Amino acid sequence: MKLYDSKAVARFLDITERRVRQLRDENVIAEVRPGLYNLKDTNHRYINYLRKRNPESEESISYNTERAKLVRAKRLNEELELKLRENQLHSTEDVETVMTDMLVNFRARLLAIPAKLAPILSKKTSQSEIAKILKSSIIDALNELSDFDKTFMTGEKHNETSHH
């Protein structure tokens, strides 16, 4: 059996060495040999001491309190399930899928702007007209990105059909 000094016991129980000596003097914990302790026995004695000091410990929690907690947890779970069914709440996976699709589409739309506008812009000589055309294309892409609800519902319906 390995024995530990008061410094090791203090670290293990997360208390000071002085508190270890006080607990020993109060006969809460016991030395196996002078200055040396059995860690397992000391730990059990200390836990029992704490339980006796705290009458609201886990042993005395009432059945009614636990039952109330369980009923509350079940009710909250049912409310979340209802919100999911009513599309007021969305699962993390759904949101990640839709956001990924949205951003991939947005990136593709932005990357298509140069190829789409190059032939048109090459014929323009007015900087303000070129800027106006570029701005219009960028605003269209941003508007598509900003319509999250529409995109989310479309993505969600797509996910439902792809799962079946």
Image (cartoon, rainbow, N blue to C red):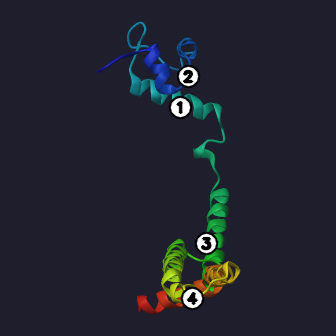
Q: Earlier in the sequence, mark 1 or mark 2?
A: 2
| Type of amino acid under label 4 | Lys
Between discs 4 and 1, the one toward the N terminus:
1
- Which label's residue is closer to the chain start, 3 or 2? 2
Residue matched to label 4: 123
Q: Residue at x 59, y 85 (%)?
A: 151
Residue at mark 2: 15
Quadrant housing the N terminus: top left
Dot 2 falls on a residue whose secondary structure is loop
Disc 1 marks a residue whose amino acid type is: Asn
Residue 103 coordinates in the image, percent (x, y): 52, 75
Q: Which amino acid, mark 2? A: Ile
Residue that mark 3 sits on = 77
The residue that disc 1 covers is: 48
Of badges 4 and 1, the one in the foreground is 4
Query: Toward the viewer: 131 or 106?
Result: 131
| Image x and y of residue 145, in percent | 61, 79
On screen, residue 142 versus residue 34, left or right, reads right
Tag 2 and tag 4, C-beta contact below 8 Å? no
**Rounded to the nearest whole Å, what is the CA distance between mark 1 and mark 3?**
36 Å
User: Is label 3 in a helix, a strand or a loop?
Assistant: helix
- Position of 79 with respect to 95 (left or right) is right
Vertical side of 144 occupied by 36: above or below: above
Q: Residue furthest top?
A: 34
Q: Which mark is residue 158?
A: none
